[in-house]
Image (cartoon, rainbow, N blue to C red):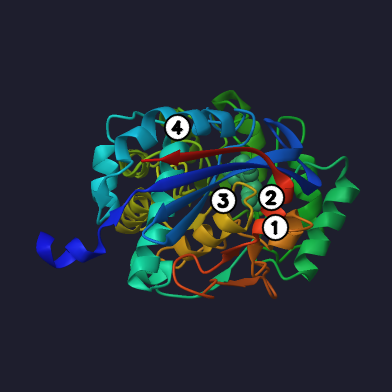
């Protein structure tokens, strides 16, 4: 067995980390804070003349996740890369077993693992989606809309996004900004697929809010309760008919199994980086499929590198709900890849201009935006 695949082994020769200063086209407010001027870290993995790309999903501040761009950088240089540099890998499974001693730090591990998949697909001259086992190349997408200053602004933003063709609209909510704006939007848009995302801002004692939202025919309510509290999500799910979608609570296939087993939710938002990379994301997908729970691909306001990975992931069978992989130009004036990943009438095509993730780096733009670099060699 090993001999047959030996020729596909890739030696981990060199890794570039590049932090970019970037600015969103809008101020994005959620229950945990707001961001606009931000930064992103791109990882380039070099092996035998090929390059694999990934993007660190973590934000500069630990509001959504305990990881940040800075903790991922440190985890990569101090814990992750020292375990893998100079070694040869055929599969992500082998790679992850060498990284098993690194507990947590999923977004940092994912950054490396995802670049490995891109490189692996390039070695095989295949688009990543085929290597992952995808079944489609047209991806219906939704949009995640931040908290606005008022109800009129919210309705206007919603209408703009409907006109752009987005297949579902997700509204960020927080205590004090929930029932009223959503009632107003539902009244204006009776037939639109609507969802809300609380990013863990509520407690079970807020049941009244969820009972009101339960009347609005939402497709799901995303992560209403604490990031580490599956039990109370199960208690809430028993009290409402709208499915709960779990985001922050799911870090692994095992979390997925436990959550679905106790009916803590009925839909899973898969963020590849939150679950340690593509291999684990595929396992999360498989567990959800076995339970009959649909999944969709979440977003972390990615640049084109992360967005491309997300689109390839979204090709798997059980990604039956529109994801947060909206048009790149919705977020950014310029993006760091070619081609620009924009949806057409709410449909993103999986990038396939070449093998792997199917996008090329715009190195000139990256050089302009770079604020920190490090190169790790064997
Ligand atoms: O909870 O899904 C979330 C963005 C950053 C952190 C967490 C979340 C989000 C989004 C936007 O909802 C997703 C996107 O458009 O990339
Ligand atoms: Mg979410």
Q: Which tag is nearer the camera, tag 2 or tag 3?
A: 2
278 vs 172, nearest the viewer? 278
Q: Which tag is nearer the camera, tag 4 or tag 2?
A: 2
- Residue 79 in picture, x, y percent from top left: 38, 29
Quadrant where the image shows the C terminus:
top left
- Residue 155 in picture, x, y percent from top left: 84, 54
**Dots 1, 2 in contact, CB < 8 A:** yes
Tell me the crowding category of disc 3: few under 14, some 14 to 19, or many 20 or more residues within 10 angstroms, Cα based.
many
Ligand 1 positioned in quadrant? top right
Give the residue number, with chain letter if any, for mark 2.
367
Element under label 4?
helix
Element under label 1?
helix
Tell me the crowding category of disc 4: few under 14, some 14 to 19, or many 20 or more residues within 10 angstroms, Cα based.
some
The residue drawn where x is 75% and y is 47% is 182
Q: Which tag is nearer the camera, tag 3 or tag 1?
A: 1
Give the residue number, with chain letter if any, for mark 3.
220
- Residue 328 in picture, x, y percent from top left: 69, 60
272 vs 269, nearest the viewer? 272
The residue drawn where x is 26% and y is 55% is 91
The answer to whether residue 161 is above or below residue 65 is: below
Element under label 3?
loop
Give the residue number, with chain letter if any, for mark 4.
77
Residue 184 lies left or right of residue 192; in this view the side is: right
Quadrant where the image shows the N terminus:
bottom left
**Dots 3, 4 in contact, CB < 8 A:** no
């Amino acid at each position: 067995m090993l001999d047959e695949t030996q020729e596909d082994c890739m030696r981990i020769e060199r890794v570039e980390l590049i932090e970019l200063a970037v600015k969103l086209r809008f101020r994005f407010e959620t229950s945990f804070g707001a961001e606009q001027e931000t930064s992103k870290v791109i990882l380039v993995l070099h092996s035998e003349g090929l390059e694999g790309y990934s993007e660190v999903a973590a934000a500069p501040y630990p509001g959504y996740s305990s990881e940040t761009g800075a903790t991922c950088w440190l985890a990569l240089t101090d814990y992750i890369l020292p375990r893998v540099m100079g070694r040869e890998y055929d599969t992500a499974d082998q790679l992850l077993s060498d990284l098993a001693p690194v507990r947590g730090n999923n977004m940092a591990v994912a950054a490396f693992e995802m670049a490995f998949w891109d490189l692996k697909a390039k070695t095989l001259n295949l688009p990543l989606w085929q290597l992952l086992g995808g079944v489609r190349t047209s991806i219906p997408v939704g949009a995640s809309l931040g908290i606005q200053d008022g109800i009129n602004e919210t309705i206007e933003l919603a209408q703009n996004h409907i006109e752009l063709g987005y297949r579902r609209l997700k509204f960020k909510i927080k205590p004090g900004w929930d029932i009223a704006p959503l009632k107003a939007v539902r009244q204006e848009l009776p037939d639109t697929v609507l969802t809300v995302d609380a990013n863990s801002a509520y407690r079970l004692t807020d049941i009244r809010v969820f009972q009101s939202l339960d009347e609005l025919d939402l497709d799901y309510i995303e992560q209403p309760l604490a990031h580490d509290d599956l039990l109370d999500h199960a208690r809430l799910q028993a009290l409402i008919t709208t499915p709960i979608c779990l985001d922050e609570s799911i870090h692994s296939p095992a979390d997925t199994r436990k959550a679905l087993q106790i009916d803590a939710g009925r839909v899973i938002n898969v963020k590849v980086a939150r679950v340690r990379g593509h291999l684990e994301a595929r396992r999360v997908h498989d567990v959800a499929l076995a339970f009959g729970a649909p999944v969709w691909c979440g977003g972390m306001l990615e640049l084109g590198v992360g967005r491309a990975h997300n689109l390839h992931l979204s090709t798997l069978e059980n990604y039956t709900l529109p994801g947060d992989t909206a048009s790149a130009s919705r977020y950014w004036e310029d993006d760091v890849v070619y081609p620009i990943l924009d949806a057409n009438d709410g449909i993103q095509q999986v990038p396939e201009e070449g093998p792997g993730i199917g996008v090329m780096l715009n190195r000139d733009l990256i050089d302009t935006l770079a604020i920190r670099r490090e190169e790790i060699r064997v």
